[in-house]
Amino acid sequence: MKNGPAPYDKQAASYDRAWRRYIARTLGFLKATISFRSSDKILDIACGTGEFERLILREHPDQQVIGIDISENMLNFARGKCSPYPNAAFLKADASALPFPDQTFDLVVSANSLHYFDKPSISLAEMRRVLLPAGSLVILDWCKDYLVCRCFDFCFRRIERGYQSCYTQRELQRLLDAAGFAIQSTRKIKLGSIFWGHIIAVATPKA
Ligand SMILES: C[S@@+](CC[C@H](N)C(=O)[O-])C[C@H]1O[C@@H](n2cnc3c(N)ncnc32)[C@H](O)[C@@H]1O
């Protein structure tokens, strides 16, 4: 982890308000896509303010959910929101160095965040490492196959602190394969905006 404030530290207080509709659409879609059992341990990589956890926990208050993020300020909002739930935990950690033993989680998710990871290959390999052999990974992020995402990618690389890159469907499939995942599905989707496009990928650890 780099020294100094994380890029999202400053935005933490306004994040939920500023991105309310975007968060509701994307995380609502993610929640509707995943399936899990009450005994499953879920890890959310780059959990931000814990909105995904809140969505899960208000329907499944005893679910074991851990969120990690590099921004302590974002995590503090997540901790506040999820304080009523005994099995929710939030840790400061980098996606490229997960502080968990091998084969810990049944489900690993990451939403709206892969484009910030400076070591995407290592981060995905870490997700593979902490997943149980029968576990699943679900990644939801911007998709560079859409023109508007390509334009934002071009600009954000130059102006947005912390931004790294978004990926085409093909690039994400290659990254997942190289990290040791068998791809179950990848799908490009529009979540509300006519132009903006996401990709959702579901993968399992290769045997
Ligand atoms: C756009 S926010 C998404 C937050 C949440 N997943 C959501 O959908 O609302 C991106 C998050 O990624 C986190 N982040 C960026 N790089 C990271 C890294 N290398 N490891 C862990 N978290 C990271 C940021 O701190 C920020 O909270």
Image (spheres, rainbow, N blue to C red):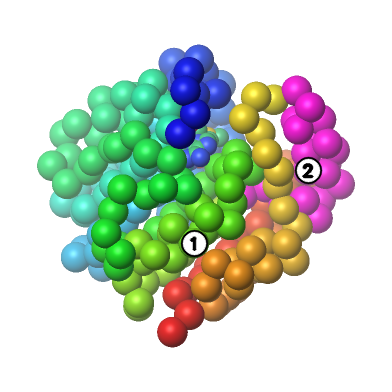
Give coordinates of residue 71: x percent, y percent: 43, 27
Q: Which residue is mark 1?
A: 125
Up the image or down, 185 lies above or below 16; here it is below
Say which of 206 and 186 sits in front: 206
Query: Looking at the magenta stretch, what is its main secondary structure?
Result: helix
**Residue occupying image coordinates x 35% and y 29%:** 75
Q: Earlier in the sequence, mark 1 or mark 2?
A: 1
Residue 187 visible in the picture = no
What residue is disc 2 on? 149
Is residue 31 left or right of 61 when viewed as pictured? right
Q: Residue at x 41, y 48 (%)?
A: 97
66 with respect to 5 (left or right): left
- Circle 2: element type: helix
Asked if ligand 1 lies within 8 A of label 2, the reply is no
The type of residue carrying mark 1 is Ala
Q: Which residues are magenta?
A: 141-159
**What is the spatial separation of the Cα atoms under label 1 and label 2, in whole angstroms?**
25 Å
The kind of residue on which mark 2 rests is: Cys
* Mark 1 or 2: the one toward you: 1
Residues packed near mark 1 inside 10 Å, few (<14), some (14 to 19) or many (20 plus)? many
Q: Which mark is residue 48?
A: none
